Image (tube, rainbow, N blue to C red):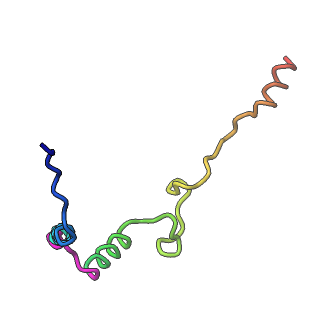
């Protein structure tokens, strides 16, 4: 007895399956919540106007020295390793 071969899909069946998958993806996309671009833009503008940004001094004015998170850290009056070495050699 000859074993039964798996059913070979016809071209029409393949096209139908692809269309059904595409239709399912489109339905998922349609079900996603939407927001108007104008509403999203207004929300973004409101957020940017209410949050202080240190990179926009023209909008917010210059920052105080302690407020700037990007200011270089002041090392103070710490001695350098080469100077500490020479001071220790003198003693």
Q: Where does the image place residue 48, in percent across and percent down from the top left? A: 38, 71
Residue closest to the eye, 49 or 76: 49
* Residue reaching furthest to the top: 91
Q: Is residue 91 left or right of residue 80?
A: right
Q: In which quadrant of the rendered image does the C terminus lie? A: top right
Q: Where does the image place residue 14, in percent across and percent down from the top left? A: 21, 67
* Residue reaching furthest to the bottom: 38
Residue closest to the eye, 34 or 16: 16
Q: Is residue 53 left or right of residue 81?
A: left
In this view, 62 is above or below 41: above
Q: In which quadrant of the rendered image does the N terminus lie? A: top left
Q: Say which residue appears at 52% left-offset and 70% top-offset.
A: 57
Q: Where does the image place residue 64, in percent across and percent down from the top left? A: 53, 60
In this view, 71 is above or below 59: above
Q: Is residue 54 left or right of residue 26?
A: right
> Is 11 one of the magenta-colored residues?
no
Magenta residues, start to end = 30-38
Q: Say which residue appears at 19% left-offset and 67% top-offset.
A: 10
* Residue reaching furthest to the front: 1
Q: Where does the image place residue 52, in percent across and percent down from the top left? A: 42, 65
Q: Residue 75: name its quadrant.
A: top right
Residue closest to the eye, 21 or 51: 21
Count of numbered marks = 0
Q: Say which residue appears at 86% left-offset and 19% top-offset.
A: 89
Q: Say which residue appears at 52% left-offset and 63% top-offset.
A: 63
In this view, 74 is above or below 7: above
Q: Residue 20: name its quadrant.
A: bottom left
Q: Residue 21: name its quadrant.
A: bottom left
């Amino acid at each position: 007895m000859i074993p039964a071969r798996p059913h070979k899909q016809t071209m029409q069946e393949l096209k139908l399956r692809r269309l059904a998958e595409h239709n399912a993806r489109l339905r998922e996309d349609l079900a996603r919540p939407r927001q108007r671009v104008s509403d999203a833009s207004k929300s973004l503008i409101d957020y940017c106007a209410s949050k202080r940004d240190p990179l926009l001094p023209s909008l917010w004015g210059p920052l105080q020295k302690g407020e700037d998170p990007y200011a270089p850290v002041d090392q103070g009056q710490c001695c350098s390793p080469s100077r500490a070495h020479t001071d220790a050699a003198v003693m």
